[in-house]
Image (cartoon, grey):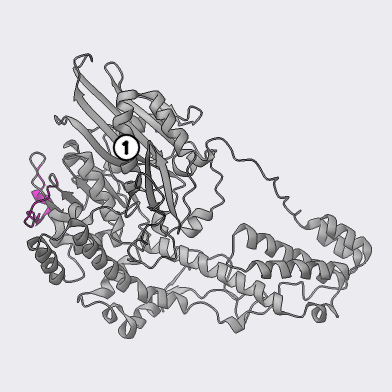
Amino acid sequence: MGRAVGESSKPQGGAARRGGAEPWGPGRAGPGGAGAAMDALCRAEPRPRRPAAASPLPWSRFSAWLDCVCVVTFDLELGQAMELVYPYDFRLTEKEKTSICYLSFPDSYSGGLGDTQFSFRLRQSGGQRTTHYEDDGEYNREAPLTLQRESAHYFGYVYFRQVKDSSMKRGYFQKSLVLVSRLPYVNLFQSLLQLIAPEYFDKLEPCLEAVCNEIDQWPPPVPGQTLNLPVMGVVIQVRIPSRVDKPGSSPVKQFNQENLLPAPLVLPSIHELDLFRCFQPVLIHVQMLWELMLLGEPIVVMAPSPTVSSEMVLALTSCLAPLRYCCDYRPYFTIHDSEFKEYTTRTQAPPNIVVGVTNPFFIKTLQHWPHILRVGELKMSGDLPKQVKVKKLTKLKTLDTKPGIYTSYKTFLHKDKTLIKRLLKGIQRKRPSEVQSALLRRHLLELTQSFIIPLEHYIASLMPLQRAITPWKNPPQIRPFRQDDFMKTLEHAGPQLTCVLKGDWLGLYRRFFRSPNFDGWYRQRHKEMTQKLEALHLEAICEANIVAWMKDKSEVEIVDLVLKLREKLVRARCQHLPVKEETLRRVGLYIETIIDSLPEDLQAVLHHH
């Protein structure tokens, strides 16, 4: 027998019940009367009162998109320094300010002049923060798992300018404009920076204030909606993806263009990168990289610039969609980062993280990591770019390390040569990069779906049958996930049904079970199934004959039922269970019916309670 998921490493709350569910009314209560019923009421929690409807807070619309905007400059005495945080009342901790300052400038010397754009991701410090944006979790319930609003991290979207300026002491103007958000909308925010940063560097603070006021008029990001976002005389048109979108479907055709003058700047995607451009030096190794990401392996991306580093890391984390990448990732990381010691220590195994770096110093400090991807500048050309080779980790030189994937990893699946042939044909026919990217994304999507569908089928079979859900007993528990039982299903319902790739699929699953990605997937599905069970139980209660049940019940049992129904109703609303409003309304009426059947003193207490 295989160990069930949840038997030790993943506790599933409560011992498994045998032979059906326990009653959730007192059932076996002794003789009771009004006194016992009163005691039950006294022990119960009071009902939470609904807060009065508040008027929208200032900056609440701005905060639906961005937490703040920062300006980082180079000070001769201080180095990188925070010049401005807007809105002025937004509080960043000193640790966060320091990290943002270092992450907003290239880490190693870059002689290149001009403008650079890149992204970073930063661990929030200092506990929960009050925000102007009042989110009850609705966005995260409706958005795809890969586009959730982060609760413990900030994304930073950077526009860095370095130009010669004789009026400055160093002879250079060096400044970064940074958008700080909890949303992973890399395309939208980098496009926004292209509009506002050049204008800001010319006109400075009043321009930034005007832009922030415009963003504060934007509608909030609602999954499934196409939005028009006006800024600086331009209307950016975007569609916010929804959880119900079909994976891999192209964005819905944009609308409302005919009455918009000037014509809007239409972004085909708020978050998808040009995968073909990002992966061009590693196209023949895409499958190996997909496996490493699926298994949550520690990976270092060593790149010549923060732009290449951040794009490669974000491309890697996106290649598992629609499966959520549940490990940590840092699109751009510097030696000044507060987690530097944590990641470079040799006293413990490297953490499950993908980290992008540019400073050559990291070649020495991270050479004990199991997988290192060294890439050069990304250049689009008419031919297949030079493909990096897989090399042994011992070949990693401290200086002048050549591009390559330094790893001893052996893939579980055989390489898909048809994908490379199709991409090569596209290059020969001068197919646009976005078409090549779509082809690559489709291939990765089908690979992920072939892997995840057997897991989805198996976990769905662990759900209790609907007929086992009865109104007056707790809903039966979801059966535990047993890895050995799952493996037995693969012979007839494995990935081979939807994927032509051969290889050791069983070995890949076994390794996946040990990864944070499996843990994250399992917890999410278990939570959704538990909520579905709760919803089905409420529906069963609605269809039951309450009056008939009450006939031979004591007052204690009836009061207990009222309290339990109220608790269920509160939980259904707080957790936004998948229940029709009509069902909740009927449960509310049931509660009133039951209370009306009780003596007046108990009625008064229950109505007050």
Secondary structure type for disc 1? helix
Kindly identify the residue that appears in the image at 68 percent across and 59 percent down.
Answer: 570
| Position in image of residue 258 (x %, y %) | 39, 53
| Rendering quarter of residue 104 | top left
Q: Nearer the viewer, residue 449 or 512?
A: 449
Q: Residue at the right extreme? A: 600
Q: Is residue 492 left or right of residue 382?
A: right
| Position in image of residue 432 (x %, y %) | 17, 58
What span is colored magenta in the figure? 378-397
- Residue 64 visible in the snapshot: yes
Q: Residue at the bottom extreme? A: 492
* Residue 389 is one of the magenta-drawn residues: yes
171, above or below 191, in the image: above
Kindly identify the residue that appears in the image at 75 percent across and 66 percent down.
Answer: 588
Mark 1: amino acid: Leu
Q: For mark 1, what is the residue?
A: 195
Q: Nearer the viewer, residue 376 or 584?
A: 584
Kindly identify the residue that appears in the image at 64 percent across and 77 percent down.
Answer: 21
Q: Quadrant of the N terminus?
A: bottom left
Magenta span: chief secondary structure? loop
- Residue 94 visible in the snapshot: no
| Position in image of residue 558 (x %, y %) | 82, 70
Kindly identify the residue that appears in the image at 77 percent across and 80 percent down.
Answer: 545
| Rendering quarter of residue 209 | top left
